[in-house]
Amino acid sequence: MSETIPFQSALDKSVPGLKSLVENHLKFSFARDEETATNRDWWLSTAKAAQSIIIERMIETMTRYHQSNTKRVYYFSLEFLMGRLFSNSLHSAGVFKEMEAALVELGLDPDIIRDEEYDMALGNGGLGRLAACFLDSLATLDLPAIGYGIHYQFGLFKQEFHNGCQVELPDAWMSFGTPWKIIRPEHSTEIELYGHVENVFDDRGNYVPRWTGARKLLGVPWDIPIPGYGTLTVNYLRLWESRATDDFDFEAFNRGGYDEAVKHKNASETVSKVLYPNDKTESGKELRLVQQYFLVACSLKDIIRRFLNQNSDWTTFPDKAAVQLNDTHPALAIVELMRQLQDVYEIDWDTAWSIVTKTFAYTNHTLLPEALEKWSVGLFQKVLPRHLQIIFEINKRFLDQVAKKWPGDTQKKKTLSLIEEGGTQMVRMAHLSVVGSHSVNGVAALHTKLLKSNLFPEFDELYPGKFNNKTNGITPRRWLLACNEGLSELITSKIGSGWIRHLDELRKLEPCAEDPQFQKDFMAVKLANKVALAKIIARECGVVVDPTALFDVQIKRLHEYKRQHLNLLHILALYRRLLQNPDLDIAPRVFIFAAKAAPGYDLAKLIIKAINAVGSKINSDERINGKLKVAFLPNYRVSLAQRIVPAADLSEQISTAGKEASGTGNMKLSLNGALTIGTLDGANVEIREEVGDENIFIFGMTVDEVEALWKKGYRPQDYYNANEELRAVIDWVGSNYFTPNEPAGVLSGLRDNLINHDSFLVLPDFQSYSDCQEKVDAAFRDQALWAKMAILNTARMGKFSSDRTIREYASEIWHVDPLPA
């Protein structure tokens, strides 16, 4: 190992130095002068200046890792919801204030420059945002790591509302480039798809399978540097872009087949076009499977290349690589590594399987059976014929284990098999993930308990100790320091800046909760954030709201189990009460929604339509004197969340108990001083333990009560008939009252679903939710009490730092140590 030389930056990070660096990038990177430069030119130049500092550290980091031949964490995820990188990069580079001063000296407004950045469209919801938080913590904790994802050209979609309905448009976030990406063509890799398997003789006279006739696809890597905060470590996120191995067919072009000449190129590039293609169709399912294989095949070849560069003993592979599977989307990595070890490197089955199971760990993110991925055997046979053979062999050997554990129990075999029998044979990707990993973790204490008791009880019995909990966390660098400058400065003025890396230090704020002056200062920050959000609501929704009203916020993916429609029924109940009694004394409220529904999820899109229709009527009804307002902000994304979260008074976390794995929105909102109204679901349970019963609003059935109701036989009509207000608002929303200029029955599907199905128990929880909201109303009227509760929420959120989560992964699953500069 060569001698370590202390890191010394070649860059001047003073205000004049940064100003000069920005001006140089403006001139030499973008060919602009100060007279002709647009705000976008200035943003690009400033981003490049920040990137210069970060890349200098990144080169040192990669040298350090290489010299140490260290073990690395490889985080596989189909989503990385990064958001904007500008502010975080400046904070991590340690030049946030200095760069702001430099921009001011250049005659620029830092806020306007920041707003030039477009969110990276690489994710959808909590799964992708968690992955982004983890990358931040890995670098901040000096842990050697690389994130692996797909370089989506259009991401999920850009959401607009036309007549209240969700409309999906391309999210062309890369149209004019981004300063954060670095292409690495030298590490491009070819993968194979389709074809068939033949058995041929090897040079020792044995039959061996050979995958032939496959179509090739090129994976081109783009790297996004991920700087740690308060450290020199810079890791990176590697994103794979799909391209054709041969871009252009000259022979076809010359004979006049112009479309044919680029057909293969277009088909190949489709793989990395869009996140989560609609899998209602067979072609959509096929594309999604191809995407998942593309991610893991490119990434594993990259990891193997790095391993073989410094190592030759394959049994040491798990000592150099820890691969974390973020949900089942990358589960094919288990099979692909097995194929590589067997078919390419000729390692015997038992040795190869031992390497595989020591390498992989699996994080489960859902208890919903429909969200546990399954792929038809026929589709596998078409797209990945060799992998299907390996899956069958894994399953055969695994079922032999099951037979030894439970002799003669065919039902156990049927329950645990990787192949689901029935009309169509299906490959169970969650089962594959459990069998092929040495660790399976849930993401909240309740979630992990239900994983072991309800979802995978037989696996837990077969593999004692394999299941463990790692409660999710969020990075305070983005979700307080970067998104809530006023509150960050207030906290730092009281307790210093140590909380940014050690969130537990927020506990020092607890004595301030009783201090009238600190309460006043805390609520003044909140009001300023609400004023800023009110301007966004006016611009985006055309709705004027009162910043002194209670801002009631539900921002998350639109799904029935998250129960935005329960929130809607309560809004309707309040509206109805006010119409019947205009003098009703309630605290004015602004109900704020932001959410995208999956393109093929019709009921979720109907809920969006209903919220917008009801909101339109309420917002224009002078009879209620502005006491209620509804704003559904379009195109929910990280940068929008960073404006909503600091302004929220009330955080809606109202999923059906037992359905939310963890949640991280609940953590972000509570950290920023919003009080939670929620069920005892996911991480809400642990948030209540931390903030105290008196500083959270809990309602609704518990997991045990939900299970008991289903066992008893749930009939929604019983609740519908027994509660006059509930019946009235359900009938109201299903009528044509809120859509008078549209065909009859536009919203009737929502009413019908609630009274005939109600799969997520909105009706049984309605009265408890409504009663709990009255407690919220009473608390908000006592501003001193509310301020105290809000401060204590912020002060007691230290547990929910993603730094704590990553430390647990590193010590208990990955066995990776920090490698600081």
Image (cartoon, rainbow, N blue to C red):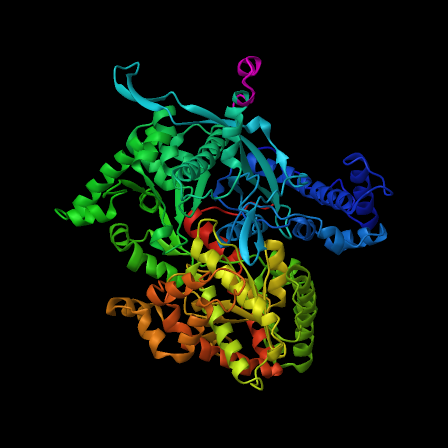
Residue drawn 62% across and 43% down?
173
Tell me residue 760's x, y (percent). 37, 64
Quadrant (top left, top right, bottom left, bottom right) of the C terminus: top right
Q: Is residue 649 something one can see in this rendering?
A: no
Q: Mark yes or no: residue 333 visible.
A: yes
Looking at the rendering, the stretch of residues picked out in magenta corresponds to: 245-259
- Say which quadrant the N terminus sits in: top right
Residue 508, given in percent of the width and then of the height, sits at 60, 71
- Taking the image as shown, residue 530 lies to the left or right of residue 707, namely right
Decide if residue 292 is on the left or right side of residue 27. Answer: left
Residue drawn 23% across the image and 37% down it: 397
Q: Count the marks.
A: 0
288 in relation to 684, above or below: above
The residue at the point 66 percent across, 70 percent down is 545
Q: Nearer the viewer, residue 817 or 209?
A: 209
Who is closer to the viewer here, 655 or 391? 655
> Where residue 806 sits in the image (x, y, percent)?
49, 53
Q: Inspect the magenta stretch and tell me whether residue 223 lies in it.
A: no
Say if 31 sits above or below 454 in the image. Answer: above
Q: Where is residue 210 in the image (x, y as percent from the top left)?
A: 33, 21
Residue at the right extreme, as displayed: 35
Extreme-left residue of the structure: 408
Asked which quadrant contains residue 290, the reply is top left
Query: Picture quarter containing residue 656?
Result: bottom left
